[in-house]
Amino acid sequence: METIDLKVERLRFLLYQIGLVAVIIVGWQGYVLEFNVPSYILPAPTAIGLALWTDSQILLANMLVTLYEVSLGFALGASVGIISAMALLFSKFLRSTFYALTVAIQAIPKSAMAPTIVLWLGIGIYSKIGMVVLITYFPVFAYAIVGMTAIDPELIELLDSMAATESQVFVKLRLPHSLYYIIQGFKIALPYSMVGAIVAEFVASQAGIGNLILIASSILDGPRVFAAMVLVSTTSLILYWALAFIEAKVVRWAPIRQTLLAGA
Amino acid sequence: MTTIAVRTLTKSYGSGSDRLTALDNVSFEVNTGEFLSIIGPSGCGKTTLLKIIAGLLSYEGGEVIVEGKVLTGATKGMAFIFQNPALLPWRRVLGNVLLSTEISGQSHDLAEQQAREMIRLVGLNGAENKFPHELSRGMQSRVALCRAMLPKPRLLLMDEPFASLDALTRERLDSELRKIWTATRFTAVFVTHNIAEAVYLSERVLVMTKRPGHVRDIVRVDLNGERSWGQLDGPPGASYLGEIRSALASAMNESPN
């Protein structure tokens, strides 16, 4: 239970943050007006706000397209990541060959791969989904492996003492333990997925928020470009919060707490 | 009838100049339904011995026969209680207790009923839905006890299960353990540092030497009937304490062979 003092403290910090943002916006507005900055270089906050209002439909429609690409790609990339982690767990052969190869491919910056992916999968939605799959795969795969193997040896010994089979150890110990780590993998993959989808849209696309930014920027519609950036940022934040919320509900037993307790 | 037969058991770790002999020529037997405690100086190999009996560790010399078989791994019907309660952090108390019967494949509904009864018996009524991190160490140890007992094991191996608890909680849990043992008469091997606990719980106490460990003494505790902690304050309880204490003191002072 928070005391009143803590609540007042939190409120105070919130006001500081709002105040800081307000100061930045006012300062920005003043600067643009004072120095007559062209709107395609740096639009005024008021212009951005107006664009958000008037262009709301087109902004949201395109944002939804990108969101769709990210969701599908993320679901696919994460699934393949988790399944390959399981495969590596059970096959020594795969472990010795596959892992090093995956790390090597991962070293290639995805942005550099974007034009190639568009060439392979077309200018439609599949290339964007493909990008997101490539981006999401490795973090989820790597964290899943850690989560399935880096388990307190005493827990494994416990199940051994109960004469548990390998598959019982996997289902009752490795899989639930890995959930926390997999979610950390998600938290890392998510913002990059958004970036990846947008970068692919920059290369070539017919729709999506990246596509909108590209077109608006080419006709020097500064307010619309910035409005789109505000929308992307807000959407990313909401997704991240949603993930954090799921994490709090699903993994209340976070390993850091466990380590502290083991030392008690 | 003999449940456990340990014959000239030898166990070493490492090789060459780093070779560490943990157990040297250990021999003893445990009868069915008997409660045997093992006590000895730190590092004498008590935990190693227990894990070898459980089939969790290999050994180089001698043989260990449990229920007529040489073990290659843990068997059903046997339960091991570790020093650390080792509860699964993502499961609540009830889920943790049920882990043992899930693995041994017993019927869920019946097991759940019995689990709730057991949780009530150890005084954790109302805590069934708590997570391990919400429990004190003593409560976690009790959950581990329930988990071990639920599949009704014939053989219970315990490695200082109550070592990190305060004296009162420890006495209480020892009493509960004694109660359950008296009612079900499983075979028990109990490793401890605590002399009073060993005398309170056991029919025989095995005293080990310093590393490399082997059997120094086996003290019979003839305190029949229901036991109480008060019994250890005067004869004959106190004489057993004294006997074991001096055996242990000699064991600690003796130079290794």
Image (cartoon, coloured by chain):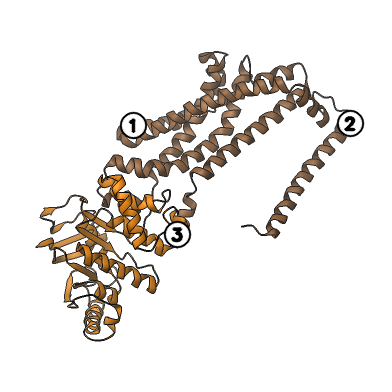
Chain colours: A brown, B orange
Q: Residue A243 at what x, y percent from top left?
A: 56, 38
The disc at residue B57 is: none
Asked if residue B136 shows in the view, the reply is yes
Q: Which residue is mark 2?
A: A33
Q: Is residue B27 left or right of residue A70?
A: left
Q: Nearer the viewer, mark 3 or mark 2?
A: 3
Give the alpha-carbon distance from disc 3 to disc 1, as whole Å: 41 Å
Nearer to me, B2 or B216: B2
Residue A175 picture quarter: top left
State which mark lies toward you, 2 or 1: 2
Q: Quadrant of the C terminus of chain A?
A: bottom left
Would you say A262 lies left or right of B68 here? right
Chain that bears disc 3: B
Q: Amino acid at mark 3?
A: Leu
Name the residue that disc number 3 marks.
B135
Disc 2 versus disc 1: distance between alpha carbons?
62 Å
Name which residue type carries label 2: Leu
